[in-house]
Image (tube, coloured by chain):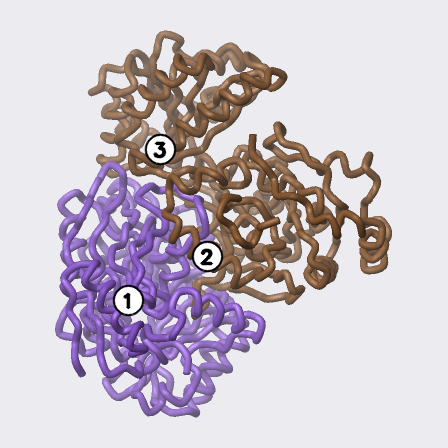
Amino acid sequence: MISLPAPKPEILARRETILADLRRLLPADAVIGEEIRMKPYETDGLAAYRQMPLAVTLPRTTEEVAQVLRYCHANGIRVVPRGAGTSLAGGALPLADAVVVGLMRMNRIKEINLDDRYAVVEAGVTNIGITKAVEGDGFFYAPDPSSQLACMIGGNVMMNSGGAHCLKYGVTANNLLGVTFVTIEGEVLEIGGNHLDAAGYDWLGLITGSEGQLGMVTDVTVRILRGPEGARAMLAAFDSVEVAGAAVDAIIGSGIIPVALEFMDKPCIHACEAFAHAGYPLDAEAMLIIEVEGSNAEQDMLLGKIRDICARFNPISMKLAESAEQSLAIWKGRKGAFGAVGRISPDYLCMDGTIPTGELPHVLKRIGEMSTQYGLGVANVFHAGDGNLHPLIMFDANDPVSFRKAEEFGADILKLCVEVGGCLTGEHGVGVEKRDLMTAQFTTRELDLQRAIKTAFDADWLLNTAKVFPLADNPKLAA
Amino acid sequence: MSLLLPETEEALAAEIARAHAAREPLGIEGRGTKRAMLRPVQAARTLSTRNLTGITLYRPTELMIRARAGTPIPEIEAALAENNQQIIAEPPDLSAMFGASEAATLGGVVSTNLSGPRRIMWGAMRDHVLGIRAVTGEGEVFRSGGRVLKNVTGLDLCKLLTGAHGTLGVLTEVTLKVLPRAEATGTLAIRVPDAARGVAALSAALGSPYGVSGAALLMDGHAPMGLTGTVALARIEDFRESVTYRMGKLREELAELGEATLLDTAASHSLWRAVRDAEPLGATPDEAIWRISVAPSAAPRAVIALRAAFDAKLLLDWGGGLIWVAGPATEHAHGAVMQAAAGGRGSFTLFRAPASLAATVPVLPEEPPPLAAIARRVKATLDPHGLLNPGRMRA
């Protein structure tokens, strides 16, 4: 279990005063103090952890966000920024002495400029909401985390979210032009703008993926792209993980960059097939879903090239979609992978390490051994082009022993990812979940350096305290 | 000026630690090819990474290459070319612009975050820095990022140091994401009457579904390759069949915008190399060079304002969003550039100028006071005594 820092007793004692002050600063409906109404905010996508906050605020404007932060800063109150609360790493988990600042009411699209290919949206606009606003004109917002129906762009910026299509289009950081940034002192800063590569230090790059450690983002200027003429997927199944990995290497080596290249292992194929009836080959040890873009003729050409490459690796079966509908059918199982695993196990932990792709066979073999050792099932989905691995560890949250084992199993997988040259998290973020594993990837001095950068923005460590950095050896969090 | 030439990261760190102990400022450079960029550095001694060379890890199927900071760019490009791969951001070779006799280093290109035409589709240099090793102003080695394509573990110091011109730490090793080189390249060159209609043509090309990977505007009188007048250029890089198909479609869809010519792979390569290196700008050695970054639709007005203010030579890239400007190295011209950038809600860089101008004007936009305060604290974290490249970015 992950521990949280002791709440500051003087803050808890002043709860009623703080609530009254916040109600003076913000419209009456923007401050929530009743326990029953704060319930939805006590957890996020890492639902095993719950903590009721001191208060919840739901500002509607940048100025209201600035007011809350200014007040909290002046009074030494911790702040937990929140978007949709979909973090799988506990990035939005409250603290007992913290004010949650939720941005879900900041959900306006402020500007769409197709000529210059950008959109300015408030932080509470959902990821899919941006694409919905521009798809009528043939445009889209590229990063597509699987939570995209719910997750909000402000959270995407803070976690530097990825998705299945980042092999071609990059992650959030690669698709941003600017943000409106509010410091803990309540200063409002425009970082970047509606143009590429502002001169000076790359504050936008540093803020992106900073998990609420440096400040809050209220408006976001994203790049929007014209969509391709079309896209189509194929499926290729192999009788070993090694062979499927070699096929991935051969595809990348051929000069083709598929827009998506997904890998599923046998347990995952079985779970998805039982759930989605997508027609996945049940005798396969590993399966690839490969998607290409372009006109119909171009799709045929690229899928033909990929089929010829896969054919050299004795596939058990291959299926090329001949229509958009068939493509959707191929994706159906993959897109439902998490739900599928949820159906065969009461609970699961979704891990998110990245590995050098060449290490895949070794890593999957080790994960298999750990699965036996811990007595817990695991299904693996993998963004094979970029090395981002998502092992889904199955456990029972009602059984504390099972939960503890699942957490240990997950930690062992992530340490393995680091050991083979990868990292703890590819797209979900560190949050509370992987906070104490940071020492596996960074030296104490490296962590000190990152902590000092945080201190440069947030001297009192009020912002999203107890996330990202290990709790131990942190003088800023001494009780 | 004495030059320190450490051959290992350890020796480099020791030099900086000594300088730190003695409170001695250091110029930081690779091969010094862009020494005249931004502001002159105030330091008696210079630390160069030119002897920290060599590719240390290259995994073509993992789309990554790692090399020591002093490795010359051509050496990296040659290794990548053997596997039909390339540096994604297409960094310019500015040796002609800066009168350098050598090629730039990896560390120099990353420290200056220089990206070429492909930036418009595939991202900037900083978007492809997967990992760094660097040394702080106290002589301490640290890493950020790693070698994998997706990594959100901890604060992203790679991006902070990319484009920091050596003022927040000295890069000793850089890991880059790389991509396959396209089989073929095609260019559609459209004669347009003026900058406004040129930028509109580029926007139309970039708003098409054909994956345009270069969108530049050659202004009157500087067009290479036998192209005269104001010419909008749209590039497509892909498999041969796709380039043929897509160029055809693009030509058809943009037919009304002006008389169009198609350029083949060989002609495209030399044309875009010239655009990448800002050759069509036609700057003379005594002229100052600026870069302005704005939303493309703000570019035409900036062009008019600049031409009204002084005898501005111009070249537009990134769909019109990057304006290269050359002109007299005067405060008057600099003021006009700053105004044009501000008028377009954009950003500017005094890229190359004699010290007499560069030392007296802001070469980058000023940061608002609260951000400047954060910048000072971040700088104090990484370089507490302000010894690394003092004066390079700001006075």
Q: Secondary structure at mark 1?
A: helix
The location of residue B155, given as percent across then percent down, is 45, 52
Q: State whether residue B395 is above or below residue A15.
A: below
Query: Which residue is under mark 2?
Result: A205
| Nearer to the camera, B163 or A262 | B163
Alpha carbon separation for disc pair 2 and 3:
24 Å
Chain under label 1? Answer: B
Alpha carbon separation for disc pair 3 and 1:
42 Å
Question: Residue at the location (43% across, 69% down)?
Answer: B379
The location of residue A124, given as percent across then percent down, is 66, 47
Amino acid under disc 1: Val
The location of residue B209, given as percent across then percent down, is 43, 46
Give residue A184's quadrant in the image.
bottom right
Question: Residue at the location (45% across, 27% down)?
Answer: A410
Q: State whether residue A292 is above or below residue B356.
A: above
Query: Which residue is under mark 3?
Result: A417
Q: Residues within 10 Å of mark 1 (few under 14, many from 20)?
A: many
Instruction: Single out the mark in the foreground, 3 or 1.
Output: 3
Determine the colour of chain A: brown
Alpha carbon separation for disc pair 2 and 1:
27 Å
Q: Is residue A129 left or right of residue B262?
A: right
Question: Residue at the location (51% across, 10% down)?
Answer: A274
Give residue A169's quadrant in the image.
top left
Instruction: Single out the mark in the foreground, 2 or 1.
Output: 2
Q: Secondary structure at mark 3?
A: helix
Query: Which residue is under mark 1?
Result: B275
| Nearer to the camera, A1 or B323 | A1
Instruction: Mark 2 vs mark 3: tell me if same chain.
Output: yes
Determine the colour of chain B: purple
**Number of marks in the rendered image:** 3
